[in-house]
Image (spheres, rainbow, N blue to C red):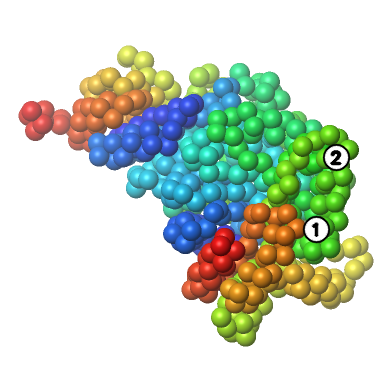
Amino acid sequence: MQSVPHRPDHHLKLYRDVLEDAELADALGFDSIWLSEHHFWFDGYCPADLAVAGAILGRTRRLGVGTAVVLLPMHSMQKVADDAATIGRLGDGRLSLGVALGYRDAEFDGFGVRRKDRGKLMDVMLPRLAESCRSVDPPVPLYVGVATAIAARRAARLGLPLFADSTMSVAELREMLDAYNAAAAAGGVNAPRAHALQRDVFVTDDRERDWAMLMPELRYMRRQYGGWSYPQEAGESVPAYVHRLDADIEAKLKNLIMGDAGYVSTRLREFEALGFDLIVCRSQFGNLPRKSLHRAFKGLSRVREEISQ
Amino acid sequence: MRLGLGPIGLRGARRSELERLAVQAVASSFDAVWVGESRAEGVGGGLAAAAMLGQAVPIRVGAVVDAGLYHPLHLAEDIAVADLTMQGRSEVLLRLTTSPSSRYGASTEPGWFDEHLHVLAAALTGAHIQWTGEHLRVPARLEANQPAPSRLALNPRPGQPAVPIWIEASETWIDDLARQLGFGVAARWTRGGSVPAATGRWPGMLLCPPNVNATDLLIAAGDGAGYFMVEARTPDEVSSAGRRLAGPLRMPEFPEWISD
């Protein structure tokens, strides 16, 4: 739901669109749709996943809805727990809650939280949230968003499944899962063996056409995330900073899985073999044209059918 | 005059029950249907539930929300996003409840609520805000968080230019605060009581029992407008309230013979 500079839209339209996307996903047989969260960004990046989750659950009858992810240290843990319990019940158990640390200084500052305290806050909040999610009827499945071994160990100690970041390579994922399993074993925790993973995926029967269409959107998305992760340093010129961000974009673009349904199925099976039984495929980058996005959704539904067989 | 159904309590509620009442509210000519959270009992998600119900009915959908328990920018974000999912049909009634404060670690001091509601009101205007108070500093401008801007803005903004927001004024200072911020004022219906005076463009709201009659409501409104939220709990009660109230509230000297 981003009104990006090169393809601006009114948010009333963007939110109408995402509800239509959810209906399409429901009709195409997807298991779930996932929402991500950021705050105070000019393009209106969605800051309130659970409100959108409520709307999607109201619009659909079967589709699961997940948060990928609520940036827990910026929130009141009690609010997240109480909101999730109500929405989970009203949604007949279709809500899943993914939570993670967050990383953008300006967001922490907006809510009066020190970014450097986020790990300690997570250590306090996560066990309480996990207990709350387990104790409500119906229980709300809780995933922990991770991009590092430290975060994976925290999840392991609580026996919570992972929601792995989209930019991690296969080698990094293996390393993280090893850290997770070792921490679970050391703590005597019977941790789950199956986890969730996010990947940037675009199914197309015309790679050349769609690559040209995707590039501005992907570059915008990656430059935005890169800028949040690696802020401009004091004394660094704008051209030098942009050059640094562009290098990050090139590295991250290598993780994009793009091709026909057969190719994408083969690639996704690699992750399934690692222990990821839920693969959340992000095909909306920025604000893609509706026709292209829906074509990709339909392609992805063929991938889902192939993998399910 | 406006007629709302609710608030339908969310404690233990099922979606099918909410939708049945909301659909009946439409069929009974209500202007809006409301749901109510109760964080003292661990029941949150009022705005998300309203966003859900907004997909089932074409009328306005309101949420009764406990304010002052968590950061007001999160509340502003929930309001903005819920309003967008409903294409600008949301309404909000804030309750300054003090009982769940221990669960949330919030204060019960009037000054605390004062600051929370000032920040909420400022954020919802879309202004680039900065607030420095005794309890809140927005943005915090903490040395540890850099780079961080000295002002911030709510993004996205609500779909409506101004989301109608009321505050239940159980004490004089809450009434004063609501009027100062341009929020509407709500009160519980009592026989012989009056609709709170309008604030800006929002009429005063009365929270009414299901069996209230039109004559009493019109007397309560006097020469002004009123927003009457009627707590009917079953489809039959909703239907009965709509038949009894919608006509007389919409037209002076409503001819009783028309529905006999």
Q: The residue tagged with tag 2: helix, strand or loop?
A: helix
Q: Is residue B9 left or right of residue B249?
A: right
Tell me where residue B4 appears, x and y as whole percent: 35, 33
Q: Earlier in the sequence, mark 1 or mark 2?
A: 1
Label 1 Cα neighbours within 10 Å, binned few <14 / some 14-19 / many ≥20:
many
The residue labelled by disc 1 is A173
Tell me where residue B55 appears, x and y as whole percent: 41, 48
In this view of the protein, which residue sits in the foreground, B100 or A98? A98
Among the 4 quarters of the image, the one containing residue A249: bottom right
Q: Quadrant of the C terminus of chain B?
A: top left
Please determine whether, in this image, residue B41 is positioned above or below residue B137.
above
- Chain ID at mark 2: A
The residue labelled by disc 2 is A185
Tell me where residue B11 appears, x and y as whole percent: 49, 26
Please determine whether, in this image, residue A29 is positioned above or below residue B54.
below
Q: Is residue B89 visible?
A: no
- State the CA–CA distance, disc 1 to disc 2: 18 Å
Please determine whether, in this image, residue B186 is positioned above or below residue B130.
above
Q: Is residue A25 visible?
A: yes
In this view of the protein, which residue sits in the foreground, B77 or A140? A140
Label 2 Cα neighbours within 10 Å, binned few <14 / some 14-19 / many ≥20:
some
Q: What amino acid is labelled 2 in the image?
A: Ala
In this view of the protein, which residue sits in the foreground, B93 or A132? A132
Q: Is residue B79 left or right of residue B256?
A: right
Return the residue found at the far right. A235
